[in-house]
Image: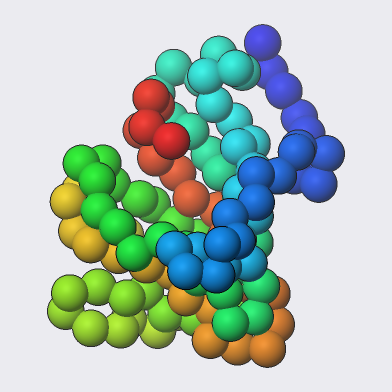
């Protein structure tokens, strides 16, 4: 069944312990609960000076930056991005999304189903 929705009508999971993650909101827009057979689409908001966990896993991230700017921290260094950019993180690469600006960072992140 087709579905149309708005990200602000989806409950956000908050990640903000100040050590592992800071100022991060995650909303699962499309996923297993919607009957999606292959992918999960998530919407993230990262507050100014916020960051996601510095981690790795065996699935890829495909990201499109909607608003703001920041950088991707990897073992190879920092890779800056801004609204309109896309980011690919391959499986098993250590990474972290960092908002180094004074505005909200927003992006869409698509991952394979059953990875969350």
Rendered residue at 76%/37% (across/down): 10
Q: Is residue 43 left or right of residue 109?
A: right
**Residue 100 placement, left or right of 53:** right
Q: Nearer the viewer, residue 48 or 87?
A: 48
**Where residue 104 sits in the image (x, y, percent)?**
69, 74
Residue at 42% x, 80% y is: 71
On the question of residue 87 being in view, the answer is no
Task: Please say if 24 is above or below 32.
Answer: below
| Color scheme of the displayed model | rainbow
104, 3: nearer the viewer? 104
Residue 29 x/y as whole percent: 64, 36
From the viewer's perspective, is 83 left or right of 116? Answer: right
Vertical side of 82 occupied by 56: above or below = above
The relative height of residue 14 versus residue 115 in the rendered view (above or below) is: below
| Residue in the picture at 50% in, 63% down | 21
Q: Position of residue 101 (x, y in %)?
A: 60, 88
Spot occupied by residue 77 in the image (x, y as percentages of width and height)? 23, 83
83 sits to left or right of 78: right
């Amino acid at each position: 069944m087709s579905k149309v929705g708005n990200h602000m009508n989806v409950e956000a999971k908050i990640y903000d312990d100040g050590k592992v993650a800071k100022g991060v909101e995650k909303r699962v827009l499309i996923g297993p609960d919607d009957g999606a057979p292959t992918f999960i689409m998530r919407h993230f908001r990262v507050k100014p000076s916020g960051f996601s966990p510095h981690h790795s896993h065996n699935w890829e991230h495909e990201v499109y930056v909607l608003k703001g700017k920041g950088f991707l921290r990897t073992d190879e260094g920092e890779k800056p991005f801004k609204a309109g950019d896309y980011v690919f993180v391959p499986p098993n690469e250590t990474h972290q999304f960092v908002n180094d600006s004074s505005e909200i960072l927003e992006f869409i992140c698509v991952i394979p189903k059953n990875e969350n």
